[in-house]
Image (cartoon, rainbow, N blue to C red):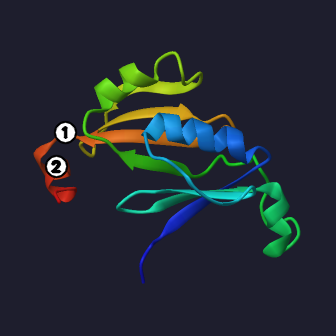
Amino acid sequence: MEFVSIRIITDDVARLVEFYERATGVRAAWSTDDFAELRTPGATLAIAATRTVPLFGPGAARPADNRSVIIEFLVDDVDRVHGNLAGFVTDFVNEPTTMPWGNRSLLFRDPDGNLVNFFTPVTEAAVAKFAR
């Protein structure tokens, strides 16, 4: 088995795609007006319109209703990225903080309120975990 992607359901695909393109520097690949993907070497962030939900089952997902999942991106320098996002991201949950498990993390919310974590491993164990 291989984990491939996470999908966000939204009422405004264009707005959310623009936000993630700007935040990550990754250009989206659009399949339709209702579906786009930001592909990275590790996984894909898919963004789909509310109109796609009935394809899976009526009411299977609701936009802007997530309070349990954190979308995470490994970055080279979380402090530099924080500086780049200042003035663009409007809802920082915390400033860059070194977590007990060895990652320096920056938490913020996207325009739909989804929690996003940009992190950089900083301890020897964390760096080893993500060595490529």
* Amino acid residing under circle 1: Val
- Rendered location of residue 38, percent (x, y): 51, 54
Image quadrant in which you'd find residue 85 = top left
Q: Circle 2 sits on which residue?
A: 127
Q: Residue at x 36, y 62 (%)?
A: 42
Q: Nearer the viewer, residue 17 or 80?
A: 17
Q: Nearer the viewer, residue 48 or 2?
A: 48
- 73 with respect to 129 (left or right): right
Q: Which mark is residue 122?
A: 1
Q: Earlier in the sequence, mark 1 or mark 2?
A: 1
* Amino acid residing under circle 2: Val
Q: Residue at x 43, y 63 (%)?
A: 43
- Rendered location of residue 35, percent (x, y): 68, 59
Does residue 114 show up?
A: no
Does residue 41 show up?
A: yes
Instruction: Specify few, some or many for label 1: CA neighbours under 10 Å numbering under 14, 14-19, or 20 or more.
Output: some
Mark 1: secondary structure? loop
